[in-house]
Amino acid sequence: MYERHHYIAGKDVEGTSGRFGPIFNPSKGEQQGKVALASKAEVESAIAAAEAAFPAWSGTSVVKRARVLQNLVQILYREKDALAEALSSEHGKVFSDAQGDVQRGLEVAEFAQGIPHLLKGEYSDNVGGGIDMYSMRKPLGVVAGITPFNFPAMIPLWMSCMAIACGNTYVLKPSEKDPTVPLMFAACWKEAGLPDGVFNVINGDKEAVDTVCTDPRVKAVSFVGSTPIAQYVYATSTANGKRCQAMGGAKNHMVIMPDADLNQVADALIGAAYGSAGERCMAISVAVCVGDEVADKLVEMLKPRVEALKIGHSMDPEAEMGPLVTADHMAKVSGYLDLAEQEGATIVVDGRNFKNDQPGFENGYYLGGSLYDNVTPDMRTYKEEIFGPTLQIIRTKSFDEAAELPTVHEFGNGTTIFTRDGDTAREYANRVEVGMVGINVPIPVPLAFHTFGGWKSSAFGDINQHGMEGMRFYTKTKTVTSRWPTGIRSGAEFVIPTLNS
Ligand code: NAD
C-alpha cells in the first residue's frame, strides 16, 4: 500500500490534514494506495510557493524557458513507458492506450517549445508623428489546473506546458483517483531544470478546489471534468475575478449516411465507443443511422464485434479494453444500462454480466461492451452522459433529422459524419452546433497546434485548450504607444487622439 502526497516548492510534502482518499487498482478491484487530501492551508502554501517563484520565472528569458520545455520533452520520451505503466495501474486503461495518453500530452510540450515564436507580439511603426505602437503578451502570475481521472497525463500536460512556457507559475490539482502520474511529472520538470516553486501539485477534493477558485493570488483556473463541477468551478472562479476555462461532459454522435463504407464505420465505432472502456470525453456514444437499412446492416455487423471485444487487465497485451475506473463508476454505468432497458431500448449486446476470469483479476471493475438499438431522443439514457463501454443506435429518416440531434443536444463536444459525399460532409461540418467535428474520422481530437474545446454544456468560458488559444488563455496583452524622438512640442491636447490628429 503506497502513499501519494503533495509537491510544493520542489519537495514532497506529506500533508497534515489527516484526510486521505483511496487509490484503487481497477484491474484487480482492490485498494493499492492512499492519497493525501489537502487542507485549505496546504493549498495556500502551494499558492504561496508559486507566487514566490513568479518574479524570477516570468523574468527568465523566453529562450531559456523554451530550453526547459525542450529538456522536458526528452525526459518525457525517456519516461513514457514508466508513466504509462503507472497510469494504467491506477486508471485501468490498457497499456498501449496509456502510452497514447502520455504521447498526446507530450505533443503539447513539443508545441510549447516554440514559445519564443508564439509570444512575438505585434508592432506598428509610425502610427502618428514619431509614434510607434507595440503589443506584448505578459504572463498572468499564479495559475491553476484542475483535472479529471480519465486523462491523467494528457490533460495536466495540456495545461501546465502552455502556462509555464508563457512565464506563469503553476498549481495543479489532479484527480484524486489517479494521482501518481502528475507527481511523476513534477520530478520530470525538476530534472528539466525548472526552478522549484514553478510547478506544484496539490492532491485533494472539494476543499482544495474551493481554495484554488477563491484565493485572490490565483489569476486563472483551467478545469476539465464533468459538467456540474465545470459549471461550479466556472461560476466560483469568475465570481472571484479569475479568468476561467471549464470543459465539461459530452455525448458524441456519429452520423452514418447511406453511402458510407459500413465496414469502415463498424471498425471506427468499435474503437471510438469501446476504447478506454468508453471513458473518453471524445468517445462516440451515439450512432445516428440515416435509414433503417443502414441501421439493420450496421447492427448486424457490430453485434459479433462487440461480443468479441477482448477485455482484460490493463497490462494484458492482448486486451483491447480494460476495467472501469472504480466500483462506484461501474455501478453508475450499469445503472444506466438498466435504465436503457426500462426506457424501452432494444438490448443487442448486454455487457452487464461480463466476468473476467484471468487469475488475480476476477474482482476487477469490468463490464462487457453493450449495444442498444432503437434509442430515442426522449430517453434519459440518451440525454445524459454515461461514460462507459456502451453504444446507442438511433434511427432517423433523413440527413436533416440526423444533423439536428447533436445540434439540439445539451452537450456539444465532438461529432463525426461518415459519408462518401463531400457536399453532405461540408454541410454537416458547417451546420452542426458542436465544437469539434470529424469527417470519416471517428475521434476528431485536435492536435497540439490547433485548439481543443467543445460548445454548449461541454465547455464554459470562451478560450480553448492548447494551440494559439492556450497561449492567449495564459497571457494578457499590454500595448505600448511610444514617441521618439522626444522634444516634439504640440501643446496640451484635450481631445482623444485619433488618426486625424
Ligand atoms: P469530475 O468532475 O468528477 O472531477 C474533475 C475534477 O473535479 C477532479 O479533480 C475532482 O477532484 C474535482 N471535483 C470532483 N467533485 C468536486 C466537487 N464537488 N467540488 C469541487 N471539485 C470537485 O470528473 P471525472 O469523473 O474525474 O472525469 C470525467 C468527466 O470529465 C466526464 O464527464 C468527461 O466527459 C469529462 N471530461 C471532459 C473533457 C473535455 O475536454 N470536455 C475531457 C476529459 C474529461
Image (cartoon, rainbow, N blue to C red):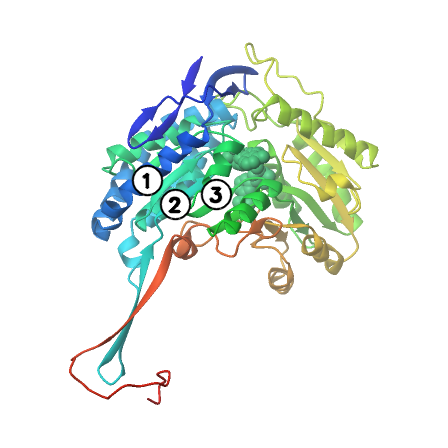
Image quadrant in which the C terminus is located: bottom left
Q: What is the CA distance from the residue labelled 3 to the residue labelled 2?
A: 9 Å
- Report helix, strand or loop for mark 1: helix
Q: Position of residue 205 (x, y in %)?
A: 51, 30
Give the total of numbered labels.
3
Q: Which residue is identified by label 2?
A: 217
Q: Nearer the viewer, residue 343 or 47?
A: 47
Q: Which residue is identified by label 3?
A: 214
- Residue 402 visible to an observer of this rendering: yes
Residue 50 is marked as 1
Image quadrant in which the N terminus is located: top left
- Tell me: residue 17, above or below residue 501: above
Label located before the other in sequence (3 or 1): 1
Q: Position of residue 130 (x, y in %)?
A: 21, 82
Q: Is residue 189 left or right of residue 397?
A: left
Q: Residue at x 33, y 25 (%)?
A: 12
* Dot 1 and dot 2 residues touching (CB under 8 Å): yes
Q: Nearer the viewer, residue 138 or 178?
A: 138
Identity of the amino acid at label 3? Thr
